[in-house]
Image (cartoon, rainbow, N blue to C red):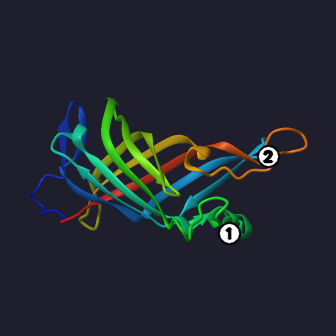
Amino acid sequence: MTSSTEAVTRDWDGLTIPAAGSYLLDAAHKRVGFVARHMMVSKVRGEFADATATITVAEDPMQSSVTATIQATSIDTTQGDRDAHLRSPEFLDAEAFPTLEYRSTGVKSRKGNEFVLSGELTIKGVTRPVDLEVEFEGVGRSPFGQDIFGFSASTEIDREDFGLTWNVALETGGVLVGKKIKIEIEGEAVRQA
């Protein structure tokens, strides 16, 4: 928390942004979700319940950075059998690779409150470059005296790029699980003392 006299926000290029500092993803106000095609006709949604992130807001906001860790065993699609399969070696292999990791490498561009955050995503021991489309949602101070800001982010990855190649061919054509996975993140970050 900051003292009551310390600035919570600052103006930057027409946008009100958080003060520089280190912020942690608020576990109670976050969703790390994904969407996958199923049998070529519908979508399955899920999320990782256990995810942490540190966001360093720099004096020059375009130099800000993010590191995130997601626990593979926390995957939840509301179907126990499917979740067990996703944790298995045929997908995430959560026993051998307990975490998914993201580390930003830079902020590429900005338009209004939208940014492109470049980084590296590691799944199942494979690291690939991944850009996140980030929308800055706002900044303020909670009733509990915490300095917070909100954001959302999304991207699409090809799961096969990360070695997640399991599939079943369908009699009607196509496959059981789509290759493209949409990632959807919503969250609040809390400034650390």
With respect to residue 61, does 89 lie above or below?
below
Local crowd at mark 1 within 10 Å, few (<14), some, or many (≥20)? some
Q: Badges 2 and 1: C-beta atoms under 8 Å apart? A: no
Residue beneath the point at 64% across and 58% down: 91
Q: Position of residue 123 (x, y in %)?
A: 51, 55
Residue beneath the point at 33% across and 32% down: 108
Q: Position of residue 5 (x, y in %)?
A: 9, 58
- Mark drawn on residue 10: none
Return the residue nearer the eye: 168 or 81: 168
**Is 65 placed left or right of 102 in the picture?**
left
What is the three-letter code of the residue carrying label 1?
Answer: Ala
Local crowd at mark 2 within 10 Å, few (<14), some, or many (≥20)? some
> Furthest-right residue in view?
171
Residue beneath the point at 78% across and 48% down: 176
- SS label for mark 2: loop
User: What separation in Å lies between label 2 and label 1 (alpha carbons)?
Assistant: 19 Å
Say how many tags the image has.
Answer: 2
**Is 70 placed left or right of 80 in the picture?**
left
With respect to residue 88, does 60 lie above or below?
above
Q: On the image, numbered disc 2 is attached to which residue?
A: 39
- SS label for mark 1: helix
Return the residue nearer the eye: 82 or 161: 161
What is the three-letter code of the residue carrying label 2?
Answer: Met
Q: On the image, numbered disc 1 is attached to which residue?
A: 84
Return the residue nearer the eye: 4 or 12: 12
**Is 164 placed left or right of 79 in the picture?**
left
**Is 25 placed left or right of 32 in the picture?**
left
